[in-house]
Image (spheres, rainbow, N blue to C red):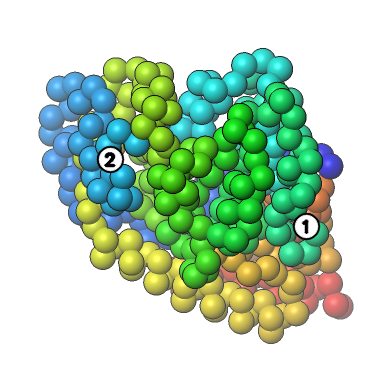
Amino acid sequence: MSEPDYSGGLSLADAKKKIGDREIYRLSSNENPLGPSPKTVAAMTTAARSINLYPPRDAAALRAVLAAQHGVTAEHVFTGAGGCEVIELAFRQFTQPGDNFIVCPPTFGFYYLMAKRYGLSLTEVPLVPTTFALDIDGIVAAVTEATRFVVIINPNNPTGTCFPDSAFTELLSRLPEHVTVLADEVYFHFAENPHYPDTVAHLMRGANIIRVHSFSKAYGMGGMRVGYGIASAPVAAEMRKLMRPFHLNAIALEGAIAAVGDAEFVEQTVQNNAIGKAYLQTQLDRLGVTHWPTDANFLLLETKLSSGALTDALLLEAVMVRDPKDSAIPNCVRVTIGTPAENAAFIAALEKILATLDE
């Protein structure tokens, strides 16, 4: 299995260099199509008037509102500059060269970067083909004395599939004490599965879990780089020791606090996603395109074209999607669920491309 790419997709500027200065539908990065909350923008605008002053040193106010939201204490929370930094902090603090961790491809390419950056061995235990379920027996069999993390992305990126609590509970019960589950849950707001795991409850019962979150998805703050983690109080304290003073800027902090407080906007985002998901699934069924159930703000689909060929063809139609560049899913692309207009533009472009294959 080839290593998935983490170079990212094209920027809008790069896309326009390829197809000209025209309206482009960016459905490649799982950003919030509604933008940030108006309350977030207002809070950041106010904060901008005082950027001559240093921000708080430790994000204590943000940790407090996050703790209240998740039913933990502020001592269980640590923050970072985006979900990726939260992940990297875990690898910095709890691994050393030669250690091992386990991933379950198809998966997020950033974890392969962590293996290279920190001199770690990475073991792949692929998800079950066609269903993308966890291979729990395979994961447990792959654990060694050197294994520090098992990475579980839930909902999974790029498949969008959800691992139920029954699978998560079984995995936790079978892992040895020296292994921590890195529960990457940056898409959790969109999970409609009634059996989605309550990882905080598992954590509070003593399970070895570090839960990863981001403000880049449901909160629409990808450009501000805010993320956070939830762990046992001792683990979270170790993570906070890695924080440089003033590690989050004042504008991002105030925006994030306002975002957490705007439950109405998050609900609007989730509702837009649910409506868009239903539309896309119906249209893909109409076109006879294979796709998988999703609990995220994107879905994975498969055509007769290679992932690269379909990505390029869609770009010519001014629609940006993500090519996972993963040999496990060679004919699949990941498409963000957008606004009604964006979703319709994607379906129209896809239908046009598929029609040329049948000529």
Image coordinates for residue 157, horizontal then vertical, percent: 61, 51
Tag of residue 62: none
Rendered location of residue 335, percent (x, y): 60, 60
Q: Which is in the foreground here, disc 2 or disc 1?
A: 2
Q: Is residue 225 above or below residue 185?
A: above
Q: Residue furthest bottom?
A: 286
Callout 1 secondary element: loop
Identify the image quadrant of residue 304: bottom right
Mark 1: few/some/many CA within 10 Å (<14, 14-19, 20+): some
Residue type marked 2 = Thr
Callout 2–callout 1 Cβ contact below 8 Å: no
How many numbered markers are drawn? 2
162 over 282 or under it: above or below: above
On residue 73, which mark appears? 2
**Left or right: 49 in relation to 273:** left
The structure residue drawn at horizontal position 13% and vertical position 34%, both measured from the top left corner, is: 49
Residue lying at 54% horizontally and 23% vertically, measured from the top left: 94
The amino acid type found where label 1 is placed reads Val
Left or right of 72 on screen, residue 137: right
Q: Position of residue 331 (x, y in %)?
A: 79, 58
Which of 210/228 is in front?
210
Q: Split into 4 quadrants, where in the image is the C terminus?
A: bottom right
| Picture coordinates of residue 262, whole percent (x, y) | 24, 57
Q: Is residue 40 visible to us here?
A: no
Q: Answer with left or right where residue 304 lies relative to residue 348.
A: right
**Which residue is more in the foreground, 316 or 117?**
117
Spatial separation of the CA atoms under disc 2 and disc 1: 37 Å
Q: Nearer the viewer, residue 266 or 11?
A: 266
89 lies above or below 274: above
Query: Any mark on residue 128, and which?
Result: 1
